[in-house]
Amino acid sequence: MRLKGKKALVTGAGGGIGSAVARCFASEGAELILSDRHAADCAAVAETIRNGGADPMVAAADVTIEDEIRELYEKIEEVHVTLDVVVNIAGGDLEPVRDINDLGYDGMSGNIDLNLKSCMLSCREACRIMRPENYGRIINMSSLVYRGSQGQFSYSAAKGGIFSFTRSLAMAMGPYNITVNALAPALVDVPVFKRVLGEERWKALAEDAARRYPMQRIASPDDVARAALFLASDDASFITGQILEISGGARL
Ligand SMILES: NC(=O)c1ccc[n+]([C@@H]2O[C@H](COP(=O)([O-])OP(=O)(O)OC[C@H]3O[C@@H](n4cnc5c(N)ncnc54)[C@H](O)[C@@H]3O)[C@@H](O)[C@H]2O)c1
């Protein structure tokens, strides 16, 4: 029970990776707050979680809206008073364009808002609660594309921004015993891909990636969840400002 008694917020908890993190943290004894854009997105996840009798708290928040992020943390304070762990997972690529000519202001703004600004705002609120407690574990969802990715101009820029923000915040929060780290998965097998691309295109894409990765497979959501668990646990108590690649050796 590596998270016994720890209060942990997971954003994007209704998604493929977020739901795996939620289940993993619950099985390690965390008291969970699950958030997603719509409450229904994570209510179903909450139902599947057996958490020693304690039901996860479910709170809707659109992370692209500053007021909703602020209200989310206020609700958490009302119920839980303090917060030990935050995993900022909500995100996604809103502008997968092939050619730089197709890069649009709205698309790039959408990607920066959803992936980068949301993370910074959530971290600000988390630190407000964690700093007086002199304890915190913050885990931000970057992506292996933080190194750059063909056709993912604004998404990779946002995920790269998460890496540099994570390092800056780690420097600022070190004196308060708050660690701040980032996860950088390569391709993860989540249901949204099949839904968006269709079964055949997704299969071809996943097989192609698996061939290119040294470990000859793509990541599972549980691979990512276990890395998040490590960073949230006391095993990682002196690790901060790091980006952990969950990539099976891809792009070494
Ligand atoms: N799947 C991959 O291959 C992969 C690889 C690297 C990084 N990531 C990152 O992992 C995270 C989770 O992605 P996933 O693969 O589980 O996809 P997913 O689509 O299943 O999960 C994303 C979740 O974020 C939520 N969300 C989207 N917009 C939101 C908003 N405005 N406010 C609140 N919630 C919002 C969605 O409702 C969804 O539940 C994302 O940040 C993604 O960029 C994914």
Image (spheres, rainbow, N blue to C red):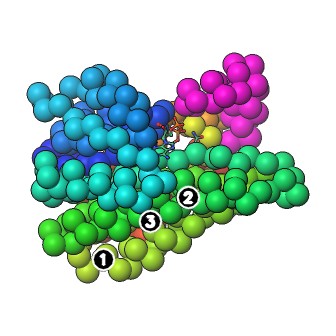
Q: Which amino acid type corresponds to the residue marked 3 in the rendered image?
A: Met
Does ligand 1 reach within 8 Å of label 1's beta carbon? Answer: no
User: Mark 1: few, some, or many residues within 10 Å (few <14, many ≥20)?
Assistant: some
Which of the 4 image quarters holds residue 175? bottom left
> Is 203 in the magenta?
yes
Q: Which amino acid type corresponds to the residue marked 1 in the rendered image?
A: Gly
Residue at (22, 38) in percent of width and height:
57
> Is 68 in the magenta?
no
Which of the 4 image quarters holds residue 70? bottom left
User: Mark 2: few, some, or many residues within 10 Å (few <14, many ≥20)?
Assistant: some
Q: In the structure shown, which secondary structural element does the residue marked by tag 1 occupy?
A: helix
Sequence order check: which comes first, mark 1 or mark 2? 2
Left or right position of 22 against 133? right
Q: Which amino acid type corresponds to the residue marked 2 in the rendered image?
A: Asp
Q: In the structure shown, which secondary structural element does the residue marked by tag 2 occupy?
A: helix
Question: Between marks 2 and 3, how big is the CA–CA gap?
Answer: 10 Å
Residue 2 appears in view: no
The x, y position of residue 216, in whole percent, is 66, 35
Residue carrying label 2: 113
Q: Which of the two marks, 2 or 3, is nearer to us in this view?
A: 2
Residue at (85, 58) in percent of width and height:
100
Residue at (31, 76) in percent of width and height:
173
- Residues shaded magenta: 189-214
Q: Nearer the viewer, residue 240 or 66?
A: 66
Residue carrying label 3: 120
